Image: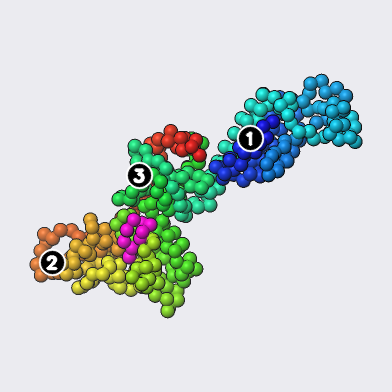
Amino acid sequence: MQTTALLSAIRQLAYEKGIPQEKLIEILKEAISNSYKKKYKTTPEVQIQLSKDNIKILIQKEVVKDPENNPLKIPLKKALKINKGVKEGEKIFVEIDEDDFGRTEALIARQLLIQKIRELETKLSLDELQAHLKDLLQGTIRKRDEKGFVLVEFEKSIGILPPNLQTKGEGYFVGKKMKFLVLNISTEKGTVLGILSRKSPLLVRRLLEKEYNEIAEGNIEILDIARQAGYKTKVLVKSKIPSLDPISTILGPKNYRIQPIINELNGERIDIIVHSDDPKTLIIRSLGNVRILNIELDTTNKIAKIVVPDEQLSQTIGKEGANAKLAASITKWKIDIKPESYLRKKTQEEQKSIFEATTTEEEENINIKDVDWKLIGNLNKNN
């Protein structure tokens, strides 16, 4: 047999597919054994001897006087050349040659080998995604279809980033490496796919947990995260150590410690808010670096009525109301923001300015039926 070429093929498969060489050898043994079983209704034992430069495949044969063209039997005269002490009726291992392993057996073995490798690839893919479910996985963008679905390649698996889980303004270019949140796993059409997100608040939580030992070890606790992906994220935190200041710890000198996360999020702003049991203090902190002239709490309707200087109204509200909505989300209070001039005019024609939290259950809105499955198939073939 072309053993040198076979060894080269096994090593190439191990490298390209990320499958251990020992596992491929086991698959090869099983494929050869099963190919004989399919043709001769018996399952012989197979041995594979691997050296640095060669591979030997041996099959167990029964020693007989006349094998009658049975490839699983060997004539005594020939067996004695392999083992001088062998006797009729005993079994010995004989290296396979072209006469033993015919075209039919080779075809069956090849089909079984391909099937087993695909099964193993599926298992390795599923294992990788399950190990990172609701966690981060770094991958490389490989393709983007006409409907906006982004295909991502990981070490042993592939994932898809649907348009509704993408962050507006991020460039998903082919070849770009990014961290993705594995939100869910799909096995639709027999293909294992990670459903990815760059939009989820959980993505930011995982980035923080991996960047800061203080958070990973529980000395600083993340209580909640509100996010408008691509614009701003507000993170509510609490220190369990009195001497540990969460803001200076997370931001670092000149924002040095938080900068890698900002870079990963394509420049998205991150506000760190220290928790307070006092609702007024918490609401003021959540709105950021603005001057609050007055705050009143309507505890019955859970509305915070706030007055700010006219020149800081747009800053307090934020782009399309995002800052106020995120503050409402993080504090669990509706926030009514009025400019200082409103108090002087007391007009009833003032535009409604109550902001409340907006939530989206992105897990429930995942739809990959529109994805171009041919692109996924081509990506698998290229691998």
Secondary structure under tag 2 reads: helix
Residue 4, image x, y percentages: 66, 36
As drawn, the label of residue 95 is none
Q: Which of marks 1 and 3 is nearer the N terminus?
A: 1
The structure residue drawn at horizontal position 20% and vertical position 73%, both measured from the top left corner, is: 293
**Residue identifier under label 3:** 163
Pointer 1 local density, CA inside 10 Å: few below 14, some 14–19, many at least 20: few
User: Which residue extends farthest top?
Assistant: 68
Residue 78, image x, y percentages: 84, 28
Q: What's the residue type where badge 2 is placed?
A: Tyr
Residue 243, image x, y percentages: 42, 79
- Judge left or right: residue 183 versus residue 227: right
**Residue identifier under label 1:** 5
Q: Which of marks 2 and 3 is in front?
A: 3
Q: Earlier in the sequence, mark 1 or mark 2?
A: 1
Q: Distance between the residues labelled 1 and 3?
A: 45 Å
- Looking at the rendering, the stretch of residues picked out in magenta corresponds to 262-271
